[in-house]
Amino acid sequence: PNVKGDKISEETKILISSLPSDADGQGKKLCKYQGCWYYHNTLQGVLNFQRGFQPQETDIILASFPKSGTTWLKALAVALLERSKNRSSDDHHPLLSDNPHGIVPFLEIDMYIESSSPDLTKFSSLPRLFSTHMPLHTMQETLKNSPCKIVYICRNMKDTLISWWFFVCAIHKIELKRSILDSIYESFCSGAIYYGPFWDHVLSYWRGSLEDPKHVLFMRYEEMKAEPHDQIKRLTDFLECPFTKEEEESGLVEEVLELCSLSNLKSLEVNKTEKVNNVEHKNYFRKGEVGDWKNYLTPEMEKKIDMIVQEKLQGSNLKF
Ligand code: A3P
């Protein structure tokens, strides 16, 4: 999906030639670095990040596997951190004039895609809010000794896969064909998909959250949908910005949830008409339902995915 970053250094080209390689369903080349599959330009962004990122104590990093609720998490984090300055009814609220991806850039796909020393002046106000699709272990060396906070959002693999299918077809403006779903399904199952294997990604953050719960929060899309109040409070507690009694009584929790709801964000002019990195904002908002996979996956596909997930997560205490 990224269009920036065709600057791949000679050093990276040599590294790539030594890495396992594959291609995604659209034939785009992937290479496996530190256990995760990347497009070549994304790998360059990852390496630039590892080389150049300097964490600050107050940094917040929002992490996810693609199509797991990244946009929602970004919107919520922005709304929570902005709430002392802006109520959602305020015309100046950043979420009313930009897409959450425009406000919270990806480290390896946006900021570090072309350089290991990007211009960070936009991040002068604290805390700095970043996002990533990298697995946790790929950031750990760079973040070492920094107490920054990482929030991961996880979604069940079947809905993630269906969401990915719709997204890929939408951004490439191609017909939503069954054959494309079949090839994405095969890639998800083999693990050789952008940022995959899915299970290793999830496990990287799951283990991190168990080892260091003060710095890694593991959230689930399904829980956010089922109990948004409780989950947003988990998030604010983790970020050490809990709602005050007055804020709760004034209805601020509901206000934030409404501002960040799929229907509200989708209806905003900025998300209907504009683009970020050549991706139309509207493509980030679809149905947002739990279990939509039931409308598309065959019973055999369901069975195979369940089997793979069960096998891969065995012993981890993580359930889907
Ligand atoms: P569906 O394709 O199942 O509808 P990401 O943000 O990681 O790209 O994930 C996209 C998925 O999150 C899409 O799922 C999209 O509809 C859903 N989504 C986007 N914004 C949302 C919001 N504010 N609330 C709930 N779901 C949202």
Image (tube, rainbow, N blue to C red):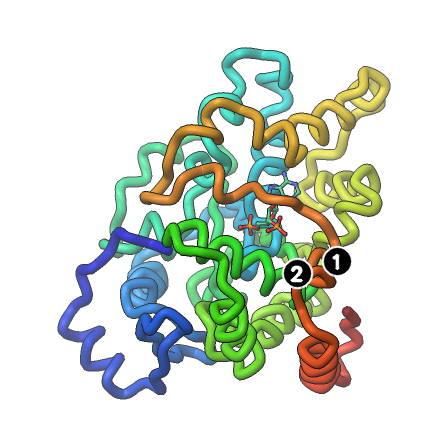
Residue 312 x, y percent position in the rendering: 67, 83
Q: Does the residue tagged 2 have its C-beta within 8 Å of any atom of ligand 1?
A: yes
The quadrant where residue 160 appears: bottom right
Above or below 264: residue 159: below
In this view of the protein, can residue 12 be seen by the observer?
yes
Residue 269 x, y percent position in the rendering: 48, 22
Residue 177 x, y percent position in the rendering: 49, 63
**Label 1 crowd (10 A; few <14 / some 14-19 / many >=20):** few
Q: Which residue is mark 2?
A: 159
- Find the distance from the CA under tag 1 to the CA under tag 2: 6 Å
In the picture, measured across the screen, residue 169 lies left or right of residue 161, that is left
Q: Quadrant of the N terminus?
A: bottom left
Q: Residue at x 37, y 54 (%)?
A: 172
Q: Does the residue tagged 1 have its C-beta within 8 Å of any atom of ligand 1?
A: no
The quadrant where residue 219 appears: bottom right
**Label 2 crowd (10 A; few <14 / some 14-19 / many >=20):** many
SS for callout 2: helix
Residue 193 x, y percent position in the rendering: 47, 73
In this view of the protein, can residue 212 be seen by the observer?
no
Circles 1 and 2 in contact, beta carbons < 8 Å: yes
Q: Which badge, 1 or 2, is on the more N-terminal residue?
A: 2
Q: Nearer the viewer, residue 223 or 182?
A: 182
Disc 2 residue type? Asp
Above or below 147: residue 275: above
SS for callout 1: loop
Q: Nearer the viewer, residue 89 or 135?
A: 89
Q: Which residue is mark 1?
A: 291
Disc 1 residue type? Gly
In the picture, measured across the screen, residue 30 lies left or right of residue 60, that is left
Q: Residue at x 72, y 31 (%)?
A: 257
